[in-house]
């Protein structure tokens, strides 16, 4: 299936054609949604017309009635010439449908005596109104209905070409899957409607002048006998106001005649097999129920398509934030601390009865801050005094924002042992001030682990709102654990001086641990030193007591100017011995965990030790029976020297855990490329994974190289493959980050 898909979508459908089809699919559906809803609802109702009629009817007659007998019968029971339909039932019963003053009623007669047997309940008037709505909106606008029919067929044909079925717990995924599973059925109804418009597979009717004098039903029978040679009649039905379809038999066999004011013409059948397929009259109640089911499916596709588009537009406008809340609590978090504090702050506010919206700065536009009575911001500082990735775009956009309606409290997290203490908070505070926002308190800076400062800050913010939180609970961000080093394996070639020294370390805890791949292990190299976070590359599903790290030994200059190993990387890579204990802390990193839905496709992009968390992602997927596809794009220096975890990756690929593996080695003479080059080379397929399959993108590596390179590559991808402008592509990437479709864990 993968190979077929790749050939079909890459060779048969170029990216520019894919864009045009997507545009046509979306806007044809949106423009005609009200009309399609009307047509589908009325079609659903009409599917039951035959069922309702059969409920009040007897079994069909076994033999037709002779024309002479029928003419005498009609002369007695239809003296006012109001009959519009005749049907024969067993027991020598003739059923007539009459119309008078816009009303319809049904009566059953004894054919021999012409005596009335009963007046039957009838919904013909109701179904007549519904049929008019279905065919011409009740306004004679049949051409509008025809346009909507063409639009429906276009939407149904294009849809499967745009997205392959893949079950996820998302509205658009169910929409795609439903469309694929029911494609033959929905095409049956829509295609037959188009064929009927063009009179393909339907009887070739003679010209019908609706303004001509309408013959009576008895006159139609007489003319069918005189001019068409009919000797017996089964059924007569008026249509197009002045014409009749007369089904019966002549000496030559069964015949169907069309009687108009001007002529009598024979047709093969009426209304024809195409109409029978479209109306669901070809197999009695079962075909009627099938038609009703198809109408429900089409309605479901219409509604889910409209909702998924509307929700996507709403998220783009609101960033997923509850704009009806009083208070917004937003965060920019690198390792999860600020996000944890924001979540706990929101929980405390809600307990006090305050309606709170909670969001990452990545999901916000500056002008949204003006929609809230108060804004609480919690910001960490990353790297060497930098704004976390989640807040950088927001910070940049403040330069052109007008926030004169915003009043805020800001909590900055940092560590005085670093040179630029709380620098991100300082930058954000200054930018907000320049944009016109009003700080309600002085910038609060927190050194190290949050505690009393956070509690006091939150209590003051609540007091500003006129509420008391009744004591803010203490928060435990990191869980202290003790580990024992079980194994350490060198991953690079120690004989190659061009390569960085990289180790894989496996630790074991005495008790099962609660974590996910992508969470962080915080290691203090020595007392008084800030803890270094390392991405965990293992999964409790393989062993709940195991933690795996990937550590690159860095170098630094000591007091004498000599190059020595980094304090923490040296400890882990060289000093700590197998069997020795390590005291560390577990920190949840929810923004960089694998999704809870194991069937969600993943695109993992890493360079160097950025592969660390992804080994855990793959280990977790290997333990899951219904895991979705994973595509890993990995770059390093040399294939023969630092293709990290190559044997594991190859085994996962053989096992089907890793669907695609694309590697790049920048210092190999036969390669000389980077991970970002693989993005550009596979742009069309990547876009299909992301856009059609709903894949999440995870990026891990250095900010200045991989981070910026990936952003540039994806901007180029959107410009070249999706037809975006540069500005639109940048905005789309920010939306991906806001929606959590693009997740980046970058260092340096």
Image (spheres, helix red, strand yellow):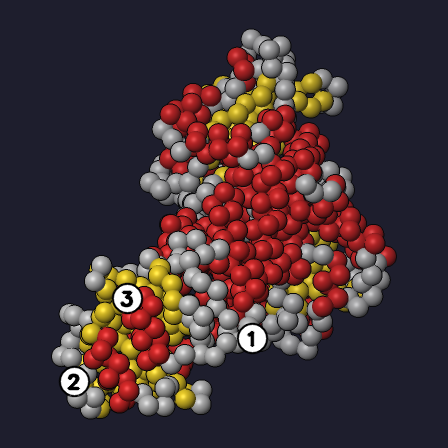
Q: Which mark is residue 229?
A: 3
Label count reads 3
Residue under pointer 1: 139
| Label located before the other in sequence (3 or 2) | 2
Residue drawn at x 71%, y 17% is 562
Judge whether 352 appears above or below 270 on screen. Answer: below
Q: Residues within 10 Å of mark 1 (few under 14, many from 20)?
A: few
Q: Which one is in front, 186 or 129? A: 129
Nearer to us: label 2 or label 1: 2
Residue under pointer 2: 112
| Label located before the other in sequence (1 or 3) | 1
Q: CA distance from mark 1 to mark 3?
A: 39 Å
Residue drawn at x 37%, y 35% is 622
For the C terminus, the quadrant is top right
Residue 15 visible, this orientation: yes
Mark 2 touches mark 1? (CB < 8 Å):
no
Residue 493 point in image, percent of width and height = 53, 13
User: Judging from the image, what secondary structure is the residue with disc 2 in?
Assistant: loop
Residue 508 point in image, percent of width and height = 40, 34
Q: Is residue 618 left or right of residue 10?
A: left
Judge whether 496 appears above or below 521 on screen. Answer: above
Q: Residues within 10 Å of mark 3 (few under 14, many from 20)?
A: some
User: Judging from the image, what secondary structure is the residue with disc 3 in?
Assistant: loop
Q: CA distance from mark 2 to mark 1?
A: 42 Å
């Amino acid at each position: 299936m993968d190979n077929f898909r790749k050939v079909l979508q890459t060779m048969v459908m170029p990216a520019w054609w894919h864009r045009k089809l997507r545009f046509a699919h979306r806007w044809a559906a949106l423009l005609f949604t009200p009309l399609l809803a009307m047509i589908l609802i009325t079609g659903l109702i009409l599917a039951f017309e035959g069922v309702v009629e059969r409920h009040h009817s007897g079994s069909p007659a076994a033999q037709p009635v002779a024309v002479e007998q029928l003419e005498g019968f009609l002369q007695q029971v239809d003296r006012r010439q109001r009959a519009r339909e005749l049907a024969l039932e067993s027991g020598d019963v003739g059923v007539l449908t009459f119309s008078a003053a816009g009303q319809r009623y049904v009566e059953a007669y004894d054919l021999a005596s012409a005596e009335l047997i009963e007046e039957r309940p009838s919904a013909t008037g109701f179904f007549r109104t519904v049929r008019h709505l279905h065919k011409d909106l009740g306004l004679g606008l049949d051409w509008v209905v025809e346009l909507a029919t063409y639009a429906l067929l276009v939407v149904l044909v294009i849809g499967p070409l745009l997205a392959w079925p893949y079950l996820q717990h998302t509205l658009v995924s169910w929409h795609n899957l439903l469309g694929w599973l029911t494609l033959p059925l929905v095409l049956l109804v829509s295609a037959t409607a188009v064929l009927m418009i063009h009179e393909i597979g339907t009887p070739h009717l003679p010209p019908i002048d609706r303004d001509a004098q309408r013959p009576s039903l008895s006159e139609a029978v007489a003319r069918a006998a005189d001019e068409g040679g009919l000797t017996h009649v089964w059924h007569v039905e008026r249509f197009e106001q002045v014409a009749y379809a007369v089904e019966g038999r002549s000496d030559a066999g069964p015949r169907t005649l069309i009687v108009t004011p001007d002529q009598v013409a024979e047709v093969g059948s009426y209304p024809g097999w195409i109409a029978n397929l479209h109306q669901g009259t070809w197999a009695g109640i079962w075909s009627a129920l099938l038609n009703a089911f198809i109408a429900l499916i089409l309605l479901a596709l219409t509604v889910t398509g409209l909702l998924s588009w509307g929700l996507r537009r709403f998220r783009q406008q609101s960033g997923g934030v509850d704009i009806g809340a009083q208070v917004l609590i937003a965060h920019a978090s690198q390792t999860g601390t600020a996000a944890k504090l924001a979540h706990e702050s929101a929980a405390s506010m809600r307990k006090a009865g305050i309606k709170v919206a909670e969001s990452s700065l990545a999901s916000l536009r500056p002008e949204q801050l003006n929609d809230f009575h108060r804004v609480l911001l919690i910001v960490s500082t990353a790297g060497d005094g930098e704004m976390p990735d989640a807040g950088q775009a927001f910070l940049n956009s403040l330069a052109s924002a007008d926030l004169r309606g915003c009043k805020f409290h800001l909590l900055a997290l940092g560590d005085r042992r670093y040179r630029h203490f709380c620098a991100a908070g300082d930058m954000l505070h200054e930018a907000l001030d320049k944009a016109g926002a009003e700080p309600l308190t002085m910038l609060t800076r927190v050194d190290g682990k949050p505690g009393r400062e956070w509690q006091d800050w939150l209590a003051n913010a609540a007091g500003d709102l006129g509420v008391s939180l009744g004591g803010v609970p203490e928060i435990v961000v990191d869980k202290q654990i003790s580990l024992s080093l079980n194994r350490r394996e060198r991953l690079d070639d120690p004989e190659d001086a061009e390569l960085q020294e990289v180790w894989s370390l496996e630790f074991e805890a005495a008790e099962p641990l609660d974590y996910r791949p992508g969470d962080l292990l915080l290691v203090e190299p020595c007392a008084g030193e800030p803890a270094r976070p390392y991405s965990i590359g293992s999964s409790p599903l393989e062993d709940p007591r195991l933690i795996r790290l990937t550590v690159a030994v860095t170098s630094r200059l000591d007091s004498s100017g000599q190059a020595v190993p980094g304090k923490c990387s040296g400890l882990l890579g060289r000093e700590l011995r197998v069997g020795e204990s390590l005291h560390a802390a577990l920190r949840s990193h929810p923004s960089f965990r694998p999704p809870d839905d194991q069937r969600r496709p993943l695109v993992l992009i890493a360079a160097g030790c950025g592969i660390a968390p992804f080994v855990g992602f793959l280990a977790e997927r290997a333990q899951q029976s219904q895991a979705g596809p994973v595509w890993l794009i990995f770059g390093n220096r040399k294939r023969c020297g630092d293709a990290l975890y190559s044997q594991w990756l190859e085994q996962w690929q053989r096992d089907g855990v890793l669907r695609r593996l694309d590697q790049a080695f920048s210092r190999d003479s036969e390669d000389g490329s980077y991970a970002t080059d693989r993005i550009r080379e596979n742009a069309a397929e990547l876009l299909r994974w992301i856009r059609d399959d709903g894949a999440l993108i995870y990026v891990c590596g250095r900010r200045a190289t991989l981070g910026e390179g990936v952003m540039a590559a994806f901007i180029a991808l959107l410009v070249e493959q999706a037809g975006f402008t540069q500005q639109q592509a940048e905005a789309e990437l920010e939306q991906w980050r806001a929606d959590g479709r693009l997740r980046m864990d970058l260092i340096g």
